[in-house]
Amino acid sequence: MSLRDSTIVVLETSRAYIRAGQGLYELLRLPTVEVQARAGLRRTEPVAASSRAPSSTPRSGNASEYIVGKQLDDLLAAGEDLDIVWPFANGGVSDWAAAEALWKHVLFTQLSLRRSQNESPVMHAISPTFSRDIHERTCKIFFERFNVPAYSVVERPLCQVYAANALAGLIVDVNTFKTDVTPVVDSIVMHAAHVVLPVGSSDCEKYLAHLWRTGASPGVLSALEGEPDLDNALVELAALVYREGLVKVPSDGETVEPEDEGVTNIAAVLIAGKEKAVIEAGTKKKRGANATAAEREREREIAALDLVTVTFREKEITVGKERHRMCEPLFDLSLLRDVPGIEPKEVEYEDVKESYMNLSEGVFLSVSRLDLHLRPIVLDGLFVCGNMADAKGLGIALQSRLAYHLTQRTDGEVQPSASRLLRVPEYFGEYREKGDRLSSFLGASIVAKLVFQDVNGRSFVQKADYGARGPRAIIELCPTVL
């Protein structure tokens, strides 16, 4: 079977987002589609629900009845009364009709594929918590409902470690609602050591909003005075501050950032499409050189206070150092006890006595479930990715806190005492700024390029295979599911 690179679809389904792109080229590209993995049904009765939290709908519907994508966003913004479901939030598929509606929207509305003449094979990056039954039912949907010519799956932790140019590592994937810690050894996902922590980026956003609400930065509250839904506005502001790259996680052992020496790699700037940003930075530097003494003094005061100004809802809002505390709940879940709108973060593991287990403890628990000789291998590739990967210093902060747990053990010389951080290599030009966050999609693109070049088709399911074996073909043919 001949498959053209330009027709291949790479699809990533995470707990809270679905990303997709069509076509594989020499320069691997960013996903062209990114939608929240949530779907809505019109309510028949008033039922309390939240568009921000994972939930199941009081009634089920057909895939055609679900509202997804921009239409759902617009209806929620207009105050429409809808039941919201996040079908993948709990690591499985809680609502198959909603899942089908989301995949259908991405493939046929966003990517403009045609079901009647679908010539696009699909490489699907999925959660490591998907069961074999879920694999088979997903395979059935893609062949029978979406008419794909070929289909293959790969687990997201494997994609993430491949994106970092490694075959082994410890993947710390901070999602919207939860955090997955998954070891990978020699391209094999170690499911027995997989740990799920009940904290994610949405909790960090609510925590920063809570700090502002309780007076950490009075200027923020005064700037948002008059907002009809102040709590939601504060959460959206926290998300904006993070997206702008203004959050830095403090940790021991950090080095001072090197002085900016200007553009040293023009080709890399052009590939990443950063020409405008470089020009603006140069203009700002020139203005600083020509500033008066009073202006320079004012700039020094702002730098000392660590103040930044962002534009939010057509307002200029100044936020201070408290923004750097945004990731604190990842390392201390007890901080979320008093934050409104957050349920208790209980962790239920047989080998854990504490109710609250932070990120470094969760990582150490995952490592401790491995055989002794495998622990140094995975710790030599600690990779922080997912929604919070853009927070400056998060990997170093986790590394420094993890070092405490490693040095407390007395298992002899085989017990590792240090870890090494992984990152997406800079030679992936398109992913230079967002590589760690989008590492799963990048890795899936790499796998797709290799798998669909197999002329014998032994690493993916073709229509003939599906016709002969049925949905079980995905279990028998895909190496990552065997």
Image (tube, rainbow, N blue to C red):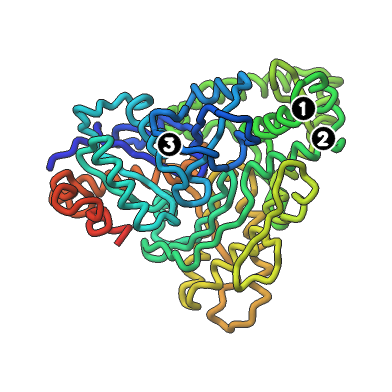
Position of residue 286 measured from the top left corner of the image (x, y, whole percent)? 67, 20
Residue 475 lies left or right of residue 296; in this view the side is left
Up-down: is 69 above or below 10? above
Residue 456 lies left or right of residue 232; in this view the side is left
Position of residue 334 measured from the top left corner of the image (x, y, whole percent)? 76, 55
Position of residue 84 measured from the top left corner of the image (x, y, whole percent)? 55, 34
* Tag 2–tag 1 contact (CB < 8 Å): yes
The residue identified by callout 1 is 230
What secondary structure is marked by label 1?
helix
What's under tag 1, amino acid-wise?
Leu
- Could you tell which of marks 3 and 1 lies nearer the N-terminus? 3
Q: Which quadrant does the N terminus fall into? A: top left
Q: Kindly report which numbered mark, 2 or 1, lies closer to the viewer in this rendering.
A: 1
Estimate the spatial distance between the alpha carbons at disc 2 and disc 1, rounded to whole Å: 9 Å
What secondary structure is marked by label 2?
helix
The residue identified by callout 3 is 19
The residue identified by callout 2 is 213
Residue drawn 45% across and 30% down? Answer: 66
Callout 1: 10 Å neighbours few (<14), some, many (20+)? Answer: some
What's under tag 2, amino acid-wise?
Arg
Estimate the spatial distance between the alpha carbons at disc 2 and disc 3, rounded to whole Å: 33 Å
- Could you tell which of marks 2 and 3 lies nearer the N-terminus? 3
